[in-house]
Amino acid sequence: MSQTKQLKNQGVITNIDWLSILLYLALVVFGWMNIYSASLPLETTSIFDLTQIYGKQLLFVGLCIPLIIVILSLDAKVYENYATIYYIIGVLLLMGLFIFGKTIKGQTNWYQFGGISLQPSEFAKIGTALLLAKYVSELQNPFETFKEQLIAMGILLLPVFFIMMQPDTGSAMIFVVFFLVLYREGFPSWYLWTGFLAALLFILALVVNPVILIIAILIGCIVHFITNKNIRRNPVIYGALALAMSVFVFSVDYVFDNVLEPHHKDRINVLFGENVDMQREGYNLNQSMIAIGSGGLTGKGFLEGTQTKGGFVPEQHTDYIFTTVGEEWGFIGAVSVVLTFVILILRIAFLAERQKNTFTRIYGYGVAAILFMHFAVNIAMIIGIFPTIGVPLPFFSYGGSSLISFTLMLFIFLKLDANKVNEW
């Protein structure tokens, strides 16, 4: 090993953010403990038993170690210089699903290699974050032209298009959070507000009479037109806006009844408590709430959860893993997990903000945004304030694709952050 390479490796060890690593280790270890509890059979076997879910997850954890070493050993410029290649590989893997993918429960979003499965949408997030960071960092004055805005949206929406064709609404929705990163770098805010308004109107149209909602929209436009004197007021623009929102509101019922899949409609109905059969579409959420609520303040104890041991919560080792935390570790354990996630996400955002390298800063915000979206949606899904859409809890939910992709994503950023001293 050359002296230069030795100095670089020593620099990584010295400059890497050990707080983020400790938080990562805490989440991975505690996550595995809860997977172990949620998947432990009646007859206890070795923790290394690869026929069991917890044994496979332990294998995935072990695979992360050499991957971390490789990530930290590579030159930091590798991630920026080859960002386009990583992105193209991710998109090609998504496209390949329609030829070589395995269909499970109506979704073609997995490659199957013997007993090993790979979900490329998890890795496409890394390629998208890298390429967006590379593209925006190379712009002199980001997003001054519509062409620049269009290219950025194209980078973001291309993988979303192929993921929606699988169809995998949950994974596709995660990519939307990249708009927050683009907004941070100067992307026009009206894109963000238009999306937020569309989502809000969609929800309101499901629970409020459309006629009443349209009247409220018209009144709102009139009041805004009269009171807002700081902008150029054009009645034609206000009329077109009111008409567009009214048409959108009236189209919601049609989309809900004729476009959404039955399971999507069931999940939305569960969210709003309408026409819910607790033994069918409402069963998962009901059992989830029972499990979390039964934990009380301090929980029933590790391996002592009756809901967990009874297998009452479906998919408990994956999307519903947080219910095990609530039942066996109680309110204190659940809050501890939430705080650990919050601290990690805020730490990544803090590290990103202090970067002098634009590429590293944008990528860091991308990592923080993706982790936040997964964390927030999964917890909201578990406690019944968001529809069940199959979004895993980072470092906690069972799955090699999820664990490895989040590990790669995080440690690429930590490598870039540790390299900042050499850049200064």
Image (cartoon, helix red, strand yellow):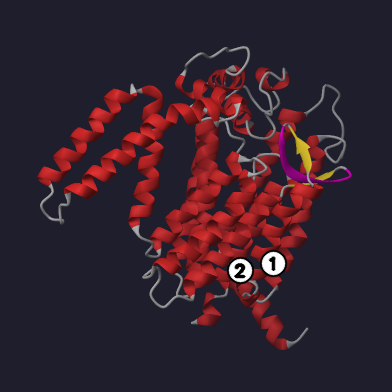
Q: Earlier in the sequence, mark 2 or mark 1?
A: 1
Where is residue 265? Give x, y as percent: 54, 25
In the picture shown, does residue 262 fall above or below 337?
Answer: above
Type of amino acid under label 1: Ile
SS state under label 1: helix
Of residue 274 and residue 327, the one placed in the foreground of this image is 274
Tell me the kind of residue under disc 2.
Answer: Lys
Q: Over which residues does the magenta segment extend? A: 106-114
The reply to whether the magenta stretch includes residue 268 is: no
Percent of width and height locating residue 400 = 74, 47
* Residue that appears at 67% across and 55% down: 123
In 3D space, how far apart are the residues under numbered discs 2 and 1 (Cα atoms)?
Answer: 7 Å
Question: What residue is pinned by disc 2?
Answer: 415
Q: Indicate whether 214 appears above or below 209.
A: below
Residue 134: quarter of image: bottom right
Classify residue 29 as left or right of residue 269: right
Residue 136 pos. (x, y %): 47, 70
Residue at the spot 32% in from the left edge and 38% down from the top edge:
245
Instruction: Determine the secondary structure under disc 2.
Output: helix
Disc 1 target residue: 71
